Amino acid sequence: MNVRMNLVQWSLVMLPILSLAQPKQLVTSARPTATRALSSTAATTERNTAKAESTASDSATPESAGSANTLPLFGERPKTAAQIDQEIHFLNDCDRNFASRPEASDFFAARGWDYVMKGDLDTAAHRFNLAWLLNAQNADAYWGLGVVCYQKDNTTDAIRMLKRGVAIADTNTVLMTDLATLQIKNYQDKADPSDLAEAEQYLQKSLAIGPALATSYQKLSLVNFLKTDYDKAWEYFHQAYTLDFSILDLTYLADLQAKRPDPKGVFK
């Protein structure tokens, strides 16, 4: 099971192409290494995790797109007695089949990413919710829920989930860049300057931690493009180009050239 997927691929497959100068995708995923639960024996793990997922499916299969199981964090609403009983049954089963709840949480988060790749967003949301239920400090659960919300065109909840993930994994530069990408999109949709300001802050923080992040430089270029500071936009674009030519957004490059020719004459 390959859980190290590329969010660029997800967005190009699942989302329509956005309009001029919009962030067309999230960045490549570098989620935590332990995305798949591993116990002492691989064979035992396979049996136990398969059983746990079967239990999750049997006890709380989403009945419809509006089911609480498909909403971020189960909709953050009061639970019925039946739902509480299901959760207790699920948690007890995980306690029997995994070495720890964080390990089980990693497994269900990994399964969530698999379902995102299959395009089954409701089941993906359910698996990320289960990962959160098992371990509320699993940033990958929030990250996954944010991606699902984004795929469903719910940018507000996507940003809210990614912010919760960043609050836990506050040195995860890729997660911060994904969050900034969504805030840039939200700014373009709603023209709230606070979105652009926060996006810039997250990108600057990501570069303070990892100064060789080409994607963060390109996103900063876009931020300054939207602020109509085209000189600064070119400066950041050139830094991205120097670090990794392959990540450059050529559609955005054309937009930038239309506003101001490349002052260094590299792109003509």
Image (cartoon, rainbow, N blue to C red):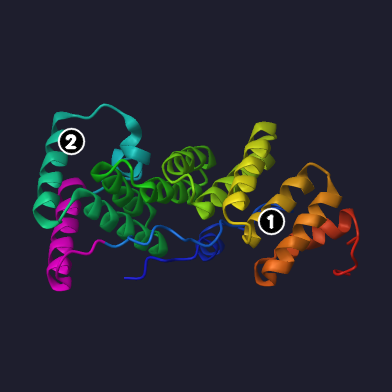
**148 or 225, which lies in front?**
225
Q: Earlier in the sequence, mark 1 or mark 2?
A: 2
Magenta segment, which residues?
37-60
Residue 11 colored magenta? no
- Kindly identify the amino acid type of the residue bearing the numbered disc 2: Gln
Find disc 1 in the rendering and name its residue: 217
Prevailing secondary structure of the magenta residues: helix
**84 or 162, which lies in front?**
162
Find disc 2 in the rendering and name its residue: 83
Q: Position of residue 138 (x, y in %)?
A: 34, 47
- Kindly identify the amino acid type of the residue bearing the numbered disc 1: Tyr
Q: Position of residue 22 (x, y in %)?
A: 68, 51
| Residue at (77, 44) in percent of width and height | 226
What is the CA distance from the residue labelled 1 to the residue labelled 2?
45 Å
Identify whether 60 is placed above or below 11.
Answer: above
| Residue at (14, 70) in percent of width and height | 41
Q: Position of residue 152 (x, y in %)?
A: 48, 48
The quadrant in which residue 245 appears is: bottom right
Secondary structure under badge 2?
helix
Instruction: Name the side, left or right, on which 68 lies relative to 239.
Output: left
Residue 47 colored magenta? yes
